[in-house]
Image (cartoon, rainbow, N blue to C red):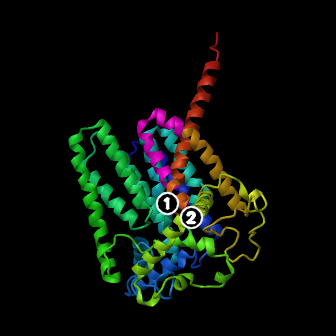
């Protein structure tokens, strides 16, 4: 932990004020939904049913789930988070958002500690300050979504990975890593890929530099991850007849491949549940069987339409990484004029969307700050790995998100998982530049005669 906590305390106060002011100025300290993500209603519905003692169920048919029957369409931890809040405080979205603000502060703190440990205090201060006021991270405390819980778990997991990469880590850190990895996977499934990459990163470091006998300790996080996730596997066995450590969410790959390709065809216009039409014997299948069928359809689509699949993946990568200002170009090159939020847009000018066209002032601010951050981060990455070999950890995290965005699905909120670490790499460059400027100024000072 940092030796002088005062800078961190001041930065956390800044982050707290920024988030609270946003909620006060643009809505959030109320019981309203202010953002367009449909998943909010699903999380709240399952959380409400958990609080009422109805278990993991939805109240209406949604996606591959039937109303009133046990479901696994989303990972369980965030609905449990909501269900606990609803049980104690009632369906109070203000409490949810305040807790999400605190979770957001965890990310700021972890970036500070990681920056101080990897580089120096000045880099840590710059990176954490940027995280404290970065508009997207400020605004995303408002949606009733799993992101804030996930971001905090990922930040803790990355910091723990750093400590495990040191020559003589304590054994309890291996167990802590396993707990954090298991909880992260139970919050969002893409964490399984991150955990696997971080585990391989640690194995490679241990194999190349440290005592190979100590490789035996890597059984600890594997066992702990299994123990953390085992209850969910037994829940899936009882609810759907098959033991599985993952939710029934493979159908989303079908949604972003087969359905994305066919959605605009005339025969699919106005069809509310296209999955019910394509899956035979829908009502006689379990949720897990429907999920598996749609996954197989998606895989067949990829094999039959590889060029279309590549086009889709490039589009999704640009959804996460909008480096090309498509919003400034008219179709077909860009998206200018395809979606303009009118004055009566139900979620207002600050409404957050899954797929953003960057038309409002706040959206433009977010996207251009990301572009500048990405540019600085690329330069900062070269400086970082030359200064500190363990900085490769940050590159592993960024590559994880790029790979997931391209292969599966990308959007602004799914990239925010790694924006704090892009800001940290950008801070490395800012610190390097500042040091060089100050060194030149010092050299120009002529001693008085």
Question: What is the chief secondary structure element of the magenta stretch?
Answer: helix
Q: Residue at x 29, y 76 (%)?
A: 234
Residue 340 drawn above or below residue 179: below
Which of 196/86 is in front? 196
Residue 359 drawn above or below residue 168: below
Q: Secondary structure at mark 1?
A: helix
Which mark is nearer the camera, 1 or 2?
2
Kindly identify which numbered label has been placed on residue 282: none
Q: What percent of the width, then of the height, locates residue 256?
A: 56, 69
Q: Residue at x 60, y 42 (%)?
A: 376
Which of 363/401 is in front? 401
Local packing at callout 2 (Cα closer than 10 Å; few below 14, some 14-19, many 20+) is: many
Is residue 390 found inside the magenta-colored segment of the image? yes
Seen from this angle, which residue lies furthest front? 304
Count of numbered circles in the view: 2
Kindly identify which numbered label has been placed on residue 104: 1
Q: What percent of the width, then of the height, locates residue 308?
A: 61, 63
Residue 304 visible, this angle: yes
Q: Residue 196 falls in which quadrant of the image?
A: bottom left
Is residue 36 found inside the magenta-colored segment of the image? no
Span highlighted in magenta in the image: 381-401
Tag 1 and tag 2, C-beta contact below 8 Å = yes
The tag earlier along the polypeptide, 1 or 2, is: 1
Which of 258/373 is in front? 258
Q: CA distance from mark 1 to mark 2?
A: 9 Å
State the residue position of label 2.
140
């Amino acid at each position: 932990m940092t030796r002088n906590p005062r800078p961190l305390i001041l930065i956390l106060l800044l982050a707290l004020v920024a988030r609270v002011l946003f909620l006060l100025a643009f809505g959030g300290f109320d019981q309203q939904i202010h953002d367009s993500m449909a998943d909010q209603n699903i999380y709240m519905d399952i959380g409400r049913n958990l609080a009422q003692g109805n278990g993991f169920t939805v109240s209406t048919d949604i996606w591959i789930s039937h109303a009133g029957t046990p479901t696994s369409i989303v990972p369980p931890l965030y609905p449990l988070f909501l269900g606990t809040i609803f049980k104690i405080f009632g369906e109070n979205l203000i409490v949810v958002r305040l807790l999400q603000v605190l979770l957001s502060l965890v990310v700021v703190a972890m970036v500070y500690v990681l920056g101080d440990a990897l580089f120096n205090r000045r880099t840590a201060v710059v990176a954490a300050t940027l995280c404290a006021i970065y508009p997207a991270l400020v605004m995303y405390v408002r949606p009733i979504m799993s992101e804030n819980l996930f971001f905090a778990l990922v930040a803790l997991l990355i910091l723990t990975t750093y400590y495990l990469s040191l020559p003589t880590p304590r054994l309890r850190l291996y167990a802590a890593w396993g707990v954090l990895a298991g909880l992260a996977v139970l919050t969002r499934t893409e964490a399984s890929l991150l955990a696997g990459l971080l585990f391989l990163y640690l194995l490679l470091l241990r194999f190349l530099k440290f005592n190979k006998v100590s490789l035996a300790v890597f059984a600890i996080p594997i066992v702990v991850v299994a123990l953390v996730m085992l209850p969910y596997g037994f829940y899936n066995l009882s609810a759907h007849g098959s033991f599985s450590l993952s939710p029934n969410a493979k159908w989303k790959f079908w949604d972003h491949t087969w359905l994305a390709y066919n959605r605009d065809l005339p025969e699919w216009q106005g069809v509310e549940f296209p999955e019910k039409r394509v899956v035979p014997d829908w009502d006689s299948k379990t949720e897990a069987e429907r999920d598996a069928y749609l996954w197989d359809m998606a895989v067949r689509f990829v094999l039959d339409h590889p060029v279309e699949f590549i086009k889709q993946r490039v589009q999704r990568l640009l959804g996460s990484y909008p480096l090309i200002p498509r919003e400034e170009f008219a179709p077909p090159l860009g998206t200018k004029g395809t979606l303009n939020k009118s004055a009566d847009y139900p979620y207002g000018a600050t409404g957050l969307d899954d797929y953003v066209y960057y038309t409002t002032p706040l959206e433009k601010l977010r996207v251009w700050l990301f572009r500048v951050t990405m540019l600085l981060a690329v330069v900062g990455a070269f400086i970082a790995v030359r200064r500190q070999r363990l900085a490769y950890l940050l590159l592993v995290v960024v590559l994880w998100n790029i790979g997931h965005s391209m292969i599966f699905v990308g959007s602004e909120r799914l990239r925010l998982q790694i924006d704090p670490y892009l800001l940290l790499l950008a801070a490395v460059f800012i610190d390097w530049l500042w040091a060089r400027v100050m060194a030149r100024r010092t050299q120009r000072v002529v001693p008085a005669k």
